[in-house]
Image (tube, rainbow, N blue to C red):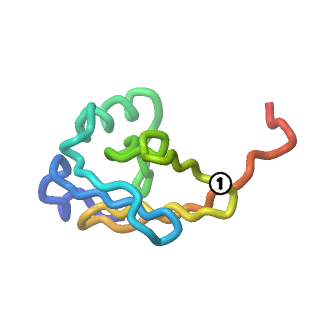
Amino acid sequence: IVPKEFVANPQALSIHVLLNGKPFQEGTSTDMIHDVYEQVEYASNIMTLRPGDVIATGTPPGVGSAKKPPVFFKAGDSLSCTYQGIGTLTNPVVSPSTTSSR
């Protein structure tokens, strides 16, 4: 994560998503329905944002359900999202818990 001073234009960042190390989705922050500033404003109105917080902004074009054939994540998959000039966040896909936390 980098300070905002190091991101020249958050509205023009390239976004690359890898599924198990292979290209899966690609887009830019320009493609988002709500711009970065709107999303930060919305999030900060409902919670306290702290340095290092990550706001999940949604998905770039190319969702799995629209692919031919459709692609759905499964337990054991690895999803990596790279934002130009910011970094990469990699998460494992896990099975839902069999015990409810509610």
> Where residue 52 appears, x then y in whole percent?
42, 57
User: In percent of the image, x 39 and y 65: which residue is there?
Assistant: 23
Report the residue at 23% width, 58% height from top: 14
Which one is in front, 50 or 75?
75
Q: Position of residue 61 (x, y in %)?
A: 32, 45
Q: In terms of depth relative to the viewer, which is nearer, 59 or 36?
A: 59
| The furthest residue to the right | 99
Name which residue lies at 49% across and 62% down: 19
Residue 68 vs 42, above or below: the answer is: below
Give the answer, above or below, for where 47 lies relative to 4. above
The three-letter amino acid code for the residue at tag 1 is: Lys
Where is residue 85? Give x, y as percent: 24, 67
Secondary structure under the numbered disc 1 in the rendered image: loop
**Residue behind mark 1:** 74
Report which quarter residue 75 is drawn in. bottom right
**Image quarter (top left, top right, bottom left or bottom right) of the N terminus:** bottom left
Residue farthest to the bottom? Answer: 21
Q: Quadrant of residue 100?
A: top right
